[in-house]
Amino acid sequence: MTKSAADPVRRRLRRRPGDDVPGDDNGRSDVDLFEVITARYSVRGYKPEPVPEATLGKVLEAARRAPTAANRQPFRVVVVHTEGREDELLRVYSRPWLVQAPLVLLMVAVPGEAWRRMDDKPYDEVDATIAMDHLVLAATALGLGTCWIAAFDPQAAREVFGLPDDVEPIALTPLGLPDKPSATTPRRPLSELVRYERW
């Protein structure tokens, strides 16, 4: 999609935290999923305005609704307010924009709850990743920014977030209002990514 074609999508999806997503009384939304997917980008600058509890609840509910192998739901989300904790959070990931956002969320896998494939491969990290994607897309639909971070210090994350030994930190994201215009990044063509019938 060209930049000019994408801009109207982003304008339609630009919401303030607390704005309801248009929909009906059954919780169905008329926000187009494909527009949300197109509008999502990695936000690396945030306004300090707080995220309303109701909005945060919707983002977390999206993670809870994510499909997981055998519905085991082997993940947890740790929510941290950045105010007053900037120095310790920067031990986990050193980019200053991480703590510009009012919240940081850590997606954690719980291996002991994982379903295992017939070759004994555990699916906790897969399931946690799916939940993280749901969370990120819901945040986009609600006008919030995120940035999926994998390049964090896992030992520092264990200490700062108080993780027990039997869980695994998977991904980190700030959560808040973007302070910069939306950005686009190139994607490889489908012809490089898709195989039909066999590899």
Image: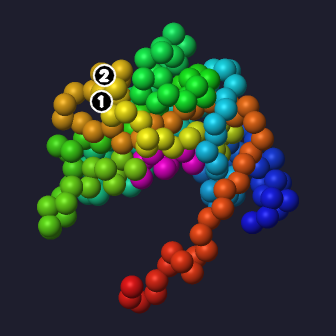
Q: Main secondary structure of the magenta part?
A: helix
Q: Amino acid at mark 2?
A: Glu
Question: Where residue 143 sits: x, y (%)?
Answer: 69, 39
Residue tagged 2: 159
Q: Quadrant of residue 120?
A: bottom left
Q: Residue at x 75, y 66 (%)?
A: 1
For marks 1 and 2, give the CA distance.
Answer: 6 Å
User: Where does residue 30 sit, x and y in percent of width and height?
Assistant: 69, 53
Q: Which residues are magenta?
A: 130-138
Kindly identify the residue that appears in the image at 57 percent across and 48 percent down: 137
Q: In the drawing, does residue 152 fall left or right of residue 43?
A: left
160 left or right of 143? left
Q: Secondary structure at mark 2?
A: helix
What residue lies at 62% left-to-right and 65% top-to-bottom?
A: 187
Identity, as a three-letter code, of the amino acid under mark 1: Gln
The residue identified by callout 1 is: 155
Location of residue 88 in the rendering, given as x and y in whole percent from the top left corner: 43, 17
Question: What x and y, as percent, mark residue 60?
Answer: 48, 36
